[in-house]
């Protein structure tokens, strides 16, 4: 055959042409067939997907974040349990006891009241034009403000301060006099029977600036169980050149005693999971405690470490009045309002201090069942269910209502026969009726309607 | 020596030239055939690989916005948008593989009405569905 082909050169050419033609046809067919197979595979996989949205709900709080290491007890001591007992509300708890002693010490009666919470603060009273306002403040966002005018008068009065066992009373506050004259803004003490004017705050010069008032009261006529302080105003704007506004802020009152004293102070470090709850979506931070103290006469306070000032403080908390225990199990919670950024650093760490009112004569035992912090947010949690035979890759999320169609890129994988919750702190649910859609990478969609 | 022989024997040149010419023709023919094969299969390949979905349709005043995702294996270019079989002007949209984006078509729609919206790509793939405008 090869001899014949050698003799017949045209035969070889024909064979080559036929073979090359077959190669070309084969290339075309195989390319098309293989690609067609590939795309069929894509379509087949798309048909096998079956994803649904089973639930969509608003998330207003993060989960609780509890201590990851033992509390630091700077005053007092731990008597039983560990920090692990304070992670959930249950029967197990960690116990502490105040440090006891017979030395003299200061007891805080009013702890840096800067009028940031409800007005008037718990136990305080006011008459006339006294109010909480933010036009001037020495500390925080508010101060106690008296809007003076023609014939305006009023009093801002502290609660009863038990100074019956005091050796001295320490008063510390900041005030501002924007135009009042002598005898229009005075400081008065109550001696159990009557009010005594002890200082004329309106007579001072250097008006329109914050001035610091500090006094150690050693006059025993004021060492009464119902001792109290008031700021009295009686302004007459018509005869002055300016409004007679006065302000009071950051009031602290302490007493010194020489009775046997006890105190407790413990600190805990808490770390937020910023990968799930990014800082930019936090609205505020809440601190909650479930505890039992065997002394109902002593208040307890929360403070947090202010990373800007490097001090523990409760400035800006929704309540700085502390909590009075009932000797049973009590809940005590504070909210860090819009100043939470001062207390949470960039790594999501917040240091919380739990401290008693001050030294007192009873050595109090404290059991802590739960202590945790959490974030207040405005996010949404989605629940996806994959009933198909393939893992689905969700790439697109829609929140639609009558006025807005909002698209979000997502990157969520849900295994076959699995349910997955997906939390987005940056997506608030709209009010009224809405539709949620998710789209898979293969092009399937799941829809959820809610309101 | 060979060149001298060839210069003396003119008849020996003709077979060489004819063989050379045939080789050139054969190579050119094969090149054309291979190029044609490549072009034909490439077009088929791209047409078969096109997949797109309309993720969302948003009726806004005098406009219908479509959010389109390319879920195929090739890039797509939208060349026509039909609303109720009428060609509408729209913002150009070309999507690479896996990408997505808004396509805004100008259209004065009526409330609570059904519209058939069709999107056609340059390669002829089309996606169509019915959508109800908001009331």
Image: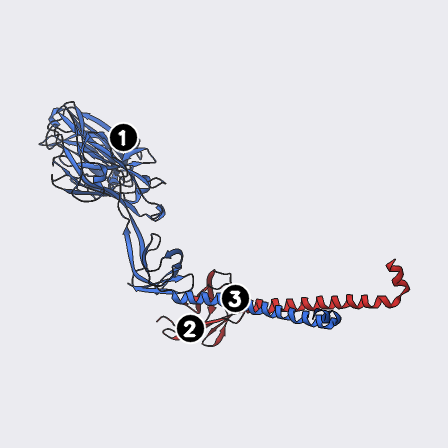
Label 3, label 1: how far apart the Cα atoms are = 86 Å
**SS at circle 3:** helix
Q: Disc 2 is attached to a residue of which chain?
A: B
**Residue furthest to the bottom:** B85
Between the residue at mark 1 and the residue at mark 2, the CA separation in whole angstroms equals 75 Å
Q: Which color was chain B given?
A: red
The one nearer the camera, A64 or A440, is A440
Q: Are marks 1 and 2 on the same chain?
A: no
For mark 1, name the chain: A
User: Chain A in the picture: what colour?
Assistant: blue
The answer to whether dots 3 and 2 both sit on one chain is no
- Read off the residue under disc 2: B129
| Residue designated by label 1 | A212
Which image quadrant for residue A85? top left
> Element at badge 2?
strand
Q: Which residue is mark 3?
A: A34
- The C terminus of chain B is located in which quarter? bottom left
Question: Is A49 positioned to the left or the right of B34 in the image?
Answer: left
Horizontal and vertical percent for residue B115?
Answer: 41, 74
From the viewer's perspective, is residue A23 above or below residue A240? below
**Alpha-carbon span between mark 3 and mark 2:** 30 Å
Q: Position of residue A281 (x, y in %)?
A: 34, 49
Label 3: how many Cα within 10 Å (few below 14, some 14–19, many 20+): few
């Amino acid at each position: 055959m090869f001899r014949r082909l050698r003799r017949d050169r045209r035969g070889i050419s024909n064979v080559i042409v036929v073979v090359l033609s077959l190669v070309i046809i084969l290339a075309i067919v195989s390319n098309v067939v293989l690609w067609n197979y590939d795309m069929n595979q894509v379509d087949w996989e798309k048909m096998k997907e079956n994803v649904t949205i089973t639930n969509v709900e608003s998330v207003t709080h993060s989960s609780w974040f509890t201590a990851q290491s033992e509390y630091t007890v700077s005053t007092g001591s731990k008597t039983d349990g560990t920090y692990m007992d304070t992670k959930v509300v249950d029967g197990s708890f960690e116990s502490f006891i105040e440090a006891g002693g017979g030395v003299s010490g200061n007891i805080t009666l009013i702890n840096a009241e800067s009028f940031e919470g409800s007005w008037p603060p718990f136990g305080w009273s006011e008459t006339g034009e006294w109010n909480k306002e933010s036009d001037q403040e020495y500390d925080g966002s508010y101060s106690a403000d008296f809007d003076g005018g023609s014939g305006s008068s009023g009093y801002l009065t502290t609660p009863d301060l038990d100074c019956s066992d005091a050796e001295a009373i320490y008063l510390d506050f900041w005030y501002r006099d924007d135009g009042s004259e002598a005898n229009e803004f005075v400081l008065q003490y109550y001696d159990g029977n009557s009010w005594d004017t002890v200082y004329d705050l309106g007579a001072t010069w250097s008006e329109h600036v914050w001035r610091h008032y500090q006094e150690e009261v050693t006059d025993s006529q004021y060492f009464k169980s119902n001792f109290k302080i008031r700021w009295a105003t009686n302004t007459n704007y018509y005869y002055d050149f300016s409004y007679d506004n006065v302000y009071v802020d950051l009031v602290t009152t302490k007493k010194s005693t020489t009775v046997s004293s006890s105190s407790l102070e413990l600190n805990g470090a808490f770390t937020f999971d910023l990968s799930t709850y990014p800082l930019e979506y936090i609205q505020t931070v809440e601190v909650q405690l479930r505890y039992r103290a065997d002394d109902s006469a002593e208040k307890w306070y929360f403070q947090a470490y202010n990373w800007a000032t490097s001090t523990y403080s409760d400035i800006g908390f929704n309540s700085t009045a502390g909590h009075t225990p009932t000797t049973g199990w009590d809940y005590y919670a504070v909210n860090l309002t819009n100043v939470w950024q001062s207390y949470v650093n960039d790594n999501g760490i917040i240091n919380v201090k739990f401290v008693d009112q001050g030294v007192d004569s009873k050595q109090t035992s404290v059991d802590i069942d739960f202590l945790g912090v959490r974030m207040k947010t405005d996010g949404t949690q989605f629940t996806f269910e994959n009933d198909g035979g393939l893992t689905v890759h969700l790439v697109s999320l829609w929140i639609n209502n009558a006025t807005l169609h909002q698209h979000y890129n997502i990157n969520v994988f849900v295994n076959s026969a699995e349910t997955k919750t997906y939390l987005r702190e940056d997506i608030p649910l709209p009010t009224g009726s809405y539709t949620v859609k998710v789209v898979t990478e293969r092009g399937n969609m799941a829809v959820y309607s809610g309101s | 020596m060979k060149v001298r022989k060839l210069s003396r024997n003119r008849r020996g040149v003709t077979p060489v030239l004819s063989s050379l010419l045939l080789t050139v023709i054969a190579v050119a023919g094969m090149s054309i055939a291979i190029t044609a094969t490549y072009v034909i299969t490439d077009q088929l390949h791209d047409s078969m690989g096109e997949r797109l979905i309309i993720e969302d349709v948003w009726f806004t005043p005098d406009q219908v916005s479509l959010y389109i995702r390319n879920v195929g294996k090739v890039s797509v270019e939208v060349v026509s948008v039909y609303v109720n079989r009428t060609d509408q002007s729209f913002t150009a949209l070309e999507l690479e593989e896996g990408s997505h984006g808004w396509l805004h078509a100008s259209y004065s729609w009526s409330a609570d009405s059904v519209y058939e919206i069709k999107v056609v790509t340059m390669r002829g793939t089309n996606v169509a569905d019915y959508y109800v405008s908001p009331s």
